[in-house]
């Protein structure tokens, strides 16, 4: 796959249009060649490095993570999630990335206690079944919300990996709809069935 190139689409402020003096008459009159930028060709596109693109993507992802975390914690005083915001951009496509928002432990379906993590991505994809975290990336939707069961990695316990023993693939939910995502995270964070019933009715 060819390496993607990115350019800055930010519009430059155009000066007020004025009628420029004829170049030849100005030279004959003053003996000087005009260096005024209005005589030059339109500015070329400024291409961005992958590092610059990744930095812009990171800012957008972190902002989305912050807003989502604030919404989650403003629902009910008994539901509080820790703020654990960090991001990753995809290799060779730094305009795409995902942001970790929060993590907790909960009772889930028939499982007594499940550690899980909640993420936002700026694309839609299937959660991979192997080491490839995302499969079949689709840009039809500009957001993806998902939560996965996690466990310490066997080789390096300080790292977390998807616990695929939960539901066969480790995915607790996966959607492009922010309302569904918020409701599912709140259900995971609710401490009792009464509160879960209230959330289900939203």
Image (cartoon, grey):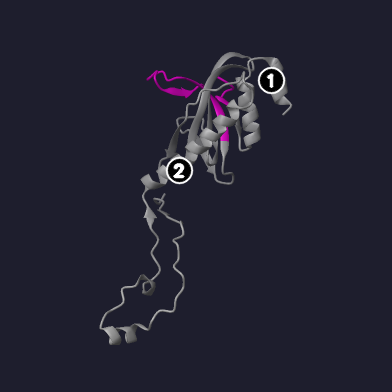
For residue 109, above or below residue 50:
above
Location of the C terminus (image quadrant)? top right
Q: Is residue 167 magenta?
A: yes
Residue 84 on image: x %, y % = 47, 26
Residue 20 on image: x %, y % = 40, 79
Label 2 or label 1, whichever comes before in sequence order: 2
For residue 18, above or below residue 25:
above
Q: Residue furthest left?
A: 31
Q: Which residue is mark 2?
A: 57
Q: Is residue 93 visible?
A: no
On residue 70, the disc is none
- Determine whether the residue tagged by mark 2 lies in a helix, strand or loop: helix
Q: Is residue 187 magenta?
A: no
Per the rendered image, the range of residues in magenta is: 145-172
Residue 158 on image: x %, y % = 39, 20
Residue 124 on image: x %, y % = 56, 40
Instruction: Tell which of 69 and 168 is nearer to you.
Output: 69
On residue 196, the disc is 1
- Determine whether the residue tagged by mark 1 lies in a helix, strand or loop: helix
C-alpha gap between disc 2 and disc 1: 35 Å
Q: How many marks?
A: 2
Q: Is residue 102 visible?
A: yes
- Residue sitting at 41 percent across and 47 percent down? 53
Instruction: Tell which of 23 and 102 is nearer to you.
Output: 23
Query: Toward which corner of the image does residue 170 lie, by quadrant?
Result: top right
Residue 132 as seen in the image, left or right of residue 146: left
Q: Residues within 10 Å of mark 1 (few under 14, many from 20)?
A: some
Residue 63 as seen in the image, left or right of residue 186: left
């Amino acid at each position: 796959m060819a390496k993607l190139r990115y350019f800055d689409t930010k519009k430059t402020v155009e000066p007020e249009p004025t009628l420029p003096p004829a170049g030849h008459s100005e030279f004959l009159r003053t003996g000087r060649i005009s260096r005024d930028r209005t005589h030059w060709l339109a500015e070329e596109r400024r291409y961005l490095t992958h590092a610059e693109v990744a930095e812009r993507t990171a800012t957008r992802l972190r902002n989305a993570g912050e807003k989502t975390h604030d919404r989650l914690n403003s629902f009910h005083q008994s539901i509080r999630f820790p703020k654990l915001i960090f991001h990753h951009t995809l290799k060779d496509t730094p305009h795409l990335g995902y942001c970790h928002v929060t993590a907790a432990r909960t009772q889930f379906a028939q499982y007594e206690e499940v550690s899980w993590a909640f993420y936002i991505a700026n694309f839609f994809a299937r959660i991979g079944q192997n080491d490839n975290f995302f499969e079949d990336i689709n840009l039809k939707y500009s957001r993806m919300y998902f939560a996965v069961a996690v466990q310490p990695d066997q080789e390096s316990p300080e790292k977390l990996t998807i616990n695929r023993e939960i539901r066969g693939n480790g995915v607790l939910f996966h959607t492009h709809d922010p309302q569904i995502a918020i409701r599912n995270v709140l259900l995971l964070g609710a401490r009792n069935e009464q509160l879960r019933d209230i959330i289900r009715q939203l």
